[in-house]
Amino acid sequence: MVPGGVPAWHAGRVNPQLADSVFVRACRREPVPHTPVWYMRQAGRSLPEYRRAREGVEMLTACATPDLVVEITMQPVRRYGVDAAIFFSDIVVPLKAIGVDLDIKPGVGPVVATPIRDRAGAAVLRPLEPGDVPYVTESVEALLKELGGTPLIGFAGGPFTLASYLIEGGPSKNHDRTKAMMYGDPELWHELMDRLGAITLAFLRVQAEAGASAVQLFDSWVGAVAPQDYRTYVLPHTAKIFAGLADLGVPRIHFGVGTGELLGVMGEAGADVVGVDWRVPLDEAALRVGAGKALQGNLDPAVLLAPWEVVEERAREVLERGRVAEGHVFNLGHGVLPSTDPDQLARLTDLVHEASAR
Ligand code: 1CP
């Protein structure tokens, strides 16, 4: 440690111990002793210990309480022995932190009090300063002590996905109003995306500078746009985010759902790892994404609701197809479903480690 309690490796940004972890090595497309595995939404409602920890505590309060963030982030690491922890937070935390009036409603998701539909609305989105999220820095630093050799993944929402919640006012099936703004008022759209991109970049930098070993951009709902529209309306903003992280030296993961037709153009955005949902086999995804990227994915989360024999067969197939990629991080094609039996995930973690051992 250096004066001020900041770990000495902060200057070089990447903790050398964790830069050599199996997970980070796979993200960098380096040889690994086994395929690393973690699960999107590995913390959360599928775990009884999560439901107990959250009793009587609202979601956004939990995200701003370091003791709870540490406990909930650690729960799946202890239970499954996964190769990476995902920081317990939510994609709307930075928006809340700059003063957007929103809440996470149980069983619904993020709900915004005053949806953004015009220039005055967009102007509310001021830049995020590290001082807006002191509990994030504190939680990451506390987690580094708890995690030992397990790397921590920081994350943020992609600008399209955040724009959708802000414009629609909550979860949306078709993102109608979002696309209406995108097509109908491109100038306003780009201004909104610029502001969201800057907030996202700042939020990811806070986590990496506090010690996260990798970052993931969840642009979960961007699969709603066609490739040519992605190129015009989204790519400039995601590319700026990934470029703005380059000096930190942490692997950058880029994920969306329903992005089969976008994998090529997403491959141009500048991430080191592209996350693939369950719809495109990994060997085909490798062709679409192009050279120089690792892949993450992509077992259908619903497969875990089937008997173990089915899970095993499907997981082996994902591993087999993943061998075609230059680097492979095993994951689900989207988040763990709340009804998933944690024992299935425990068995799956062991299977991935054993079946991929080299
Ligand atoms: O009461 C509860 O338990 C709330 C459920 C919950 C949880 C556990 C929400 C509300 N967010 C989270 C945590 C969370 N959110 C994590 C960390 C946990 C982990 O991965 O282990 C992460 C990475 C997220 C990211 C997130 N939030 C995304 C991107 C990932 C994805 O699933 O596509 C999105 C789209 C959100 C919005 C959101 N927050 C919560 C819900 C239920 C939703 C989705 C709502 C919708 O369908 O639009």
Image (cartoon, rainbow, N blue to C red):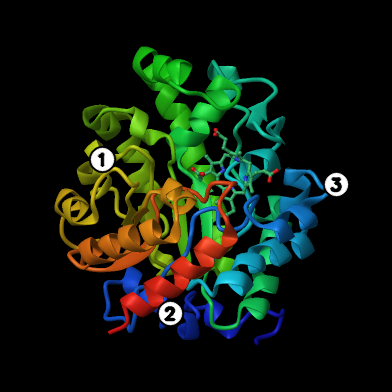
Bin the neighbour count of mark 2 within 10 Å (Cα to Cα): few under 14, some 14-19, many 20 and up. some
Specify the farthest residue to the right. Answer: 56
Q: Quadrant of ligand 1?
A: top right
Q: Give the amino acid at mark 1.
A: Gly
Residue receiving disc 2: 19
Q: Nearer the viewer, residue 147 or 348?
A: 348
Residue at (24, 50) in percent of width and height: 267
Is 16 on the left or on the right of 145, as rendered? Answer: left
Would you say residue 272 is visible in this rendering?
A: no
Residue at disc 1, secondary structure = helix
Residue at (67, 80) in percent of width and height: 145
Q: Give the amino acid at mark 2.
A: Ala
Q: Is residue 138 above or below residue 310?
A: below
Residue receiving disc 3: 56
Provide residue 233's location: percent of width, then percent of height.
33, 29
Bin the neighbour count of mark 3 within 10 Å (Cα to Cα): few under 14, some 14-19, many 20 and up. few
Bin the neighbour count of mark 1 within 10 Å (Cα to Cα): few under 14, some 14-19, many 20 and up. many
Q: CA distance from mark 3 to mark 2?
A: 38 Å
Q: CA distance from mark 2 to mark 1?
A: 30 Å
Residue receiving disc 1: 260
The answer to whether the residue labelled 3 contacts the one labelled 2, judged by CB atoms less than 8 Å apart, is no
Count of numbered circles in the view: 3
The picture quadrant where one finds residue 187 is top left
Q: Say whether disc 2 or disc 1 marks the residue closer to the N-terminus.
A: 2
The picture quadrant where one finds residue 272 is bottom left
Q: Quadrant of the C terminus?
A: bottom left
Provide residue 79's location: percent of width, then percent of height.
61, 71
**In the image, which is nearer the foreground, mark 2 or mark 1?**
1
Provide residue 80's location: percent of width, then percent of height.
56, 71
Q: Say whether disc 3 or disc 1 marks the residue closer to the N-terminus.
A: 3
Q: Say whether disc 3 or disc 2 marks the residue closer to the N-terminus.
A: 2
